[in-house]
């Protein structure tokens, strides 16, 4: 699928298989042999969450991630006896079983889809300086723009019932920065410290995943928000990019279709850090076409 750490992981598994076939693996060194494999598997999970959000939203992925964390803890404890080796085997089996439905969904044959919209990738989305069009084909999947919120635009903010509540501080500004391609873009947005930004997303199809893309100023990294939909927590939106030279970036967040229960939902982004400001300039909303 293009997940580079998965290729490294496969090579590590093949190396371990060779060791096992040569009778070089036993209870005394099983944890040592598997430690590198497990760490590569954790890197694979991070890459999937960042660059393949639709896979991360599949049924079973969250359970697989939890099982992998349990396996990692056991392996890091470095047991050296038979009971320890059996414990590793049990956790490894649980991790593999949790991953099975995620992998099977990819393996199932699917009909070829007609490409609709501009071709792009999840990685290109992050540094895209152009406006986001009505239709996009991202890494082979078609998406249609269902809504668009322009901050510091009275008409758009009113239509989406945008507001910020409980903030320690808040300000609006118009900025002109560049993207990594050196393209200069001017835009208006808001920033807030503490509190919670809330807005409606309209024109949705219930049951379909929702991709939210935001433009933000990346001068400071570690902008973390708790994302809620209609009062239910979806997860954390973690923005780690930081760039003081080319300050514009885009970042995306996936809301699984199970949270989309009507044609209009209320989203909120609650600041996790009470001291670090959260900023946003535009929000684009896409669903699978």
Image (tube, rainbow, N blue to C red):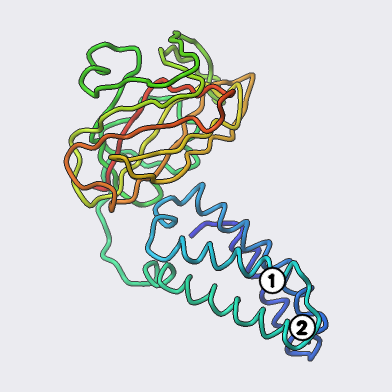
Give above or below for 114 relative to 96: above
Q: Residue 232 location, x and y as percent? A: 34, 44
Marks 1 and 2, how far apart at CA? 21 Å
Q: Nearer the viewer, residue 159 or 285?
A: 159
- In this orientation, which residue lies closer to the viewer: 183 or 271? 271
What is the quadrant of residue 87 in the picture?
bottom right
The image position of residue 80, as x and y in percent, is 81, 81
Question: Looking at the picture, does residue 142 appear above or below residue 278?
Answer: below
Q: Residue at x 62, y 59 (%)?
A: 42
Q: Nearer the viewer, mark 1 or mark 2?
A: 1
Quadrant in which residue 29 is drawn: bottom right
Other residues around mark 1 within 10 Å, as few (<14) / some (14–19) / many (≥20)? some
State left or right for residue 287 relative to residue 226.
left
Per the image, label 1 sits on a secondary structure element best described as helix
Give how far across and how far down residue 43 sits, in percent.
62, 56
Which residue is label 1 attached to? 74
Q: Which mark is residue 19?
A: 2
The one nearer the camera, 96 or 226, is 226
Numbered disc 2: secondary structure: helix
In the image, taking residue 205 as reference, residue 246 lies left or right, namely right
> Which residue is depicted at the point 75% across and 75% down?
31
Where residue 102 sits: x, y (%)? 42, 67
Q: Is residue 262 above or below residue 16?
A: above
């Amino acid at each position: 699928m293009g997940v580079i750490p998965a290729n490294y992981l496969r090579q590590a598994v093949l190396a371990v298989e060779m060791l096992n076939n040569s009778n070089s693996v036993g209870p005394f060194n099983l944890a040592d042999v598997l430690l590198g494999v497990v760490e590569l598997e954790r890197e694979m999970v991070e890459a999937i969450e960042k660059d393949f959000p639709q896979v991360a939203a599949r049924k079973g992925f969250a359970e697989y991630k939890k099982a992998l964390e349990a396996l990692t803890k056991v392996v890091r404890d470095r047991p050296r006896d038979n009971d320890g080796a059996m414990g590793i085997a049990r956790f490894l089996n649980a991790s593999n079983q949790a991953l099975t439905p995620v992998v099977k969904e990819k393996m199932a044959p699917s009909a070829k889809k007609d490409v609709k919209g501009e071709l792009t990738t999840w990685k290109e989305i992050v540094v895209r300086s152009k406006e986001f069009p009505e239709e996009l084909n991202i890494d082979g999947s078609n998406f249609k723009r269902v809504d668009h919120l322009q901050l510091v635009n009275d008409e758009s903010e009113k239509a989406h019932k945008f507001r910020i509540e409980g903030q320690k501080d808040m300000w609006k500004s118009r900025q002109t920065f560049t993207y990594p391609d050196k393209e200069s873009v001017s835009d208006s947005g808001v920033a807030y410290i503490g509190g919670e930004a809330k807005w409606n997303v309209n024109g949705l199809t219930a049951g379909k995943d929702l991709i939210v893309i935001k433009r933000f100023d990346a001068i400071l990294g570690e902008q973390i928000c708790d994302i809620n939909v209609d009062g239910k927590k979806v997860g954390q939106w973690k923005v780690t990019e930081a760039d003081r030279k080319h300050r514009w970036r885009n970042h995306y967040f996936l809301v699984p279709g199970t949270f989309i229960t009507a044609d209009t939902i209320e989203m909120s982004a609650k600041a996790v850090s009470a001291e670090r400001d959260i900023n946003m300039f535009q929000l684009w909303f896409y669903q699978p076409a």
